[in-house]
Image (cartoon, rainbow, N blue to C red):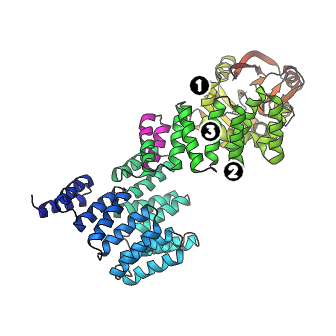
Amino acid sequence: MSYDILFQQALQAHEQGNFDAAEKIYRQILQTAPNNPDVLNLLGLVAQAKNVHNEAVELFYKAIKQAPKHAPFYFNLAISLSALDKDVEALDNLQRAIELAPDEKEIYNRQGLVLQKLNRIEEAQQAFIKALQLDPNYSEAKTNLAMTYINSDKNKAIAFLQEIANQFPQDGLSRYYLATLSFDNNDLQAAQKYALEAQKIFEESDEISLILGLIALKQKNIAEAKENFAASLKINPHNVAAMLNLANIETNEQLFAEAEKKYKQALDLEPNNIDAHLNYANMLYLQSRLNEALDEYRAVILLNPKSAAASNNIGVILRDLGTYDDALGLFFNAFALDQTKEEYSLNIAETLVLFYRQDPENAKKIAQNWLKNAPNNIYAQHTCASFNGEKIENNKVYTEKLFDNFADNYELVLKRIDYSLPRSIRELAGNVEGAIVDLGCGSGLVGQALKTPQNHIIGVDISRNMINQAAKKGVYKQLVKGDVVAFCQKKLADIKPSLVVLADVLGYIGNLAPLFEALKGYKTCFSIELSADGDYKLNEAGRFIYNPQYVENVLQQNGFKIIAKKETVLRKEDGKDVNGLLYLVQ
């Protein structure tokens, strides 16, 4: 077959995006014409399209050696050099291209992009302006010029981009950037509008499919997010961001085998990608592959010693393995790096409780030192009070923060501790007709247990995230965010419930007199965790425990009669039963 026919076949495959077929033919041509600069350049462009930039650079250098005065070869070389973060070398080659072709606007535009990447903003602006002097309607250069103002004047950049989008109805780049900026500002409606407009112009763009996927993910439209991430990967199988987002969804759906393939592929493409290591480690942890997860988290620490997330996640694994002192060290490291992340404080508090059961004196010292260094941290305050058996009355802020952070994993944890209180309440209360008020409703498990066609249930909880979880159950007529005592004082008289339920709620209240004064006249079912002495106190786990005599005195003072009282196991801690009492009173 003649050279011309082969070359045309290769070009056709290349233009159709069939890079493997094009590469095969180009290499076939090189066997007979090893120094053909055009073929070397085209083969470099194939490698560039496949993100194999080291190979592309080698091929472009070979092409330049054969044709040292051909500007496009220097231009193409600069693109791959910049992709390899060899930006100074890229600028040298762009300058050579400008010397050979001073009237090519694309060269100045690329020069501006590389200068912008190096944060040489004023020089980048001059390069874009030079491109626009050659072609005032060069919308890509205008858009890139607008983006140079993002850090210094974001509003100016957005206004500039909107002006470009209005001026050039077929300019997709300005619309793409407007979509990303709107997404960053959490304006999902605008982000979707601009992204869809850009998609119509570009038709196939992996980056636009990616941003549409991220928008859908934030809107909790998981099916649409998956579809867009998959579309992004179909266009560009090497789009790591789309790969990771799709793998994260598959992890959440427990499609671990599919997710693992994508995490490994992402790490093959970008071995130093911290998000890939973190998310892969999370997937391994969910499968209880703890040693493999540790290796991935440690890789993150090596890449970024100041990664609070990695320190925290290694601490979680060590806590699961029972190495509480080492886990605490890592949690405190995460806390020191980012004190705003409440998850880290919660992990410290929970691990200190576990450590307290092994070594109370050292746990107390660590807690006191934490409080000394972070006196306003509500978890540190509550932990120290718990270890000292102090009384903190109805600590609403602590309870709200605790359950807001706990909500996503709440039911998973309850399964682990054999939580059966909703079933016990149903057995004690029976079928209830009319209105039920579920105080401290949590994720709605009691509502599920009590719901019948003959009743309607109102749920109350101090945690907005718990309310959101309860709403998913579909059993509540109404859900109210608020403190349970305040709700009883202000709202019960309007509802006139047949039954009020407090399942594991008294552990966060303390002094029960205001609560039962507000509950006068209403049939009530509630549980307590038992204490043998005093009236009530915080235990080391941070929950109030009660002497039954104190509880029954409060009931008597407020005119209640005990209809039924039942010993029950509330849950398991460290494999041991936590004993309590379940009351039905009128």
Pointer 3: what residue? 314
**First along the sequence among labels 2 and 1:** 2
Q: Position of residue 402 (x, y in %)?
A: 71, 39
Picture layout, residue 575 above or below residue 336 = above
Q: Quadrant of residue 33?
A: bottom left
* Residue sitting nearer the eye, 377 or 429: 377
Q: Position of residue 423 (x, y in %)?
A: 64, 20
Going by the numbered disc 2, the residue's amino acid type is Leu
In the image, is 31 to the left or to the right of 543?
left
Q: Position of residue 8 (x, y in %)?
A: 16, 62
Residue 337 tag number:
2
Q: Quadrant of residue 26?
A: bottom left
Element class at badge 3: helix
The residue located at (49%, 75%) in the rendering is: 124
Q: Quadrant of the N terminus?
A: bottom left
Q: Nearer the viewer, mark 1 or mark 3?
A: 3
**First along the sequence among labels 2 and 3:** 3
The residue located at (48%, 38%) in the rendering is: 251
Q: Is residue 255 magenta?
A: yes
